[in-house]
Amino acid sequence: MYRPKAFQEDRLEVLQGLIREHPFAIIVTNGPAGLLATHAPMELDADAGPRGTLVGHLSRANPQWEEMQTSQETLVVFQGPQAYISPSWYPSKREHGRVVPTWDYIAVHAWGRAQTFDDAESLRAVLDSLTDRHEEGRPKPWAVGDAPNDFVDGAMKAIVGFRIEIGRIEGQWKISQNRSSEDQRGVIEGLQSGDEQARAIAALVPLPENEG
């Protein structure tokens, strides 16, 4: 992705942290069928490979899993909070008026060669891991084992799993780093009156340590 220097984020622990917090991704391939994209939840195995490995599954009816087998690389896009930034929030607007709207956001792009699998043991492990993670903390968490075995077996025949060892990864944290501290304070104040995503961005906008 286009990454101006001020917004680049390359610390692996930070990039992996966003993947864990925002696991619903866009999977992009460019194979014989052309560009394809699928939205799907992912799991990160941080210890598998130097940059970690992404694990997930697709419907067997989705042709993208076959494209994964022939694509040299698969791109997986993760996006965190994002919000519109109004120029009316900048004190500099009142000084000279040379300001324009923008959008603040954080995102991670990860690339790797995908390997698909459809054996029952591996698929069940993926389903268990995804389900247990997202059911965690619920008063009565649901588990894959709560469903009848024959139903689960049938469901697994309808999906194909995949692993993508991350070969390269990069992040963009566009959070008003290129603005003055006065404008940053204005952005924070403006965002704090917005929705949940806006408030999440507000918490990320950097200020000098003695102004935080």
Image (spheres, rainbow, N blue to C red):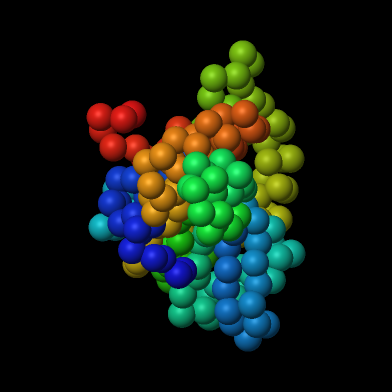
Query: Is residue 119 in view from this perspective?
Result: no
Q: Tell me: residue 82, above or below residue 146.
A: below
- The residue sitting at 42% across, 57% down in the picture is 172
Residue 106 left/right relative to 32: left
Q: Furthest-bottom residue in view?
A: 32
Which quadrant would the C terminus be assigned to in this image? top left
Foreground residue, 69 or 96?
96
Image spot of residue 131 (x, y percent): 58, 35
Image spot of residue 66 (x, y percent): 61, 73
Foreground residue, 150 or 194?
194
Q: Tell me: residue 15, above or below residue 207.
A: below
- The residue sitting at 39% across, 54% down in the picture is 178
- The residue sitting at 51% across, 54% down in the picture is 96
Foreground residue, 171 or 46?
171
Image spot of residue 81 (x, y percent): 55, 43
Q: Tell me: residue 133, above or below residue 55.
A: above
Residue 131 left/right relative to 184: right
- The residue sitting at 45% across, 53% down in the picture is 174
Q: Tell me: residue 54, above or below residue 143.
A: below
Residue 45 left/right relative to 22: left
Q: Quadrant of residue 13?
A: top left
Query: Is residue 208 in view from this perspective?
Result: yes
Image spot of residue 151 (x, y percent): 74, 40
Q: Quadrant of residue 8?
A: bottom left
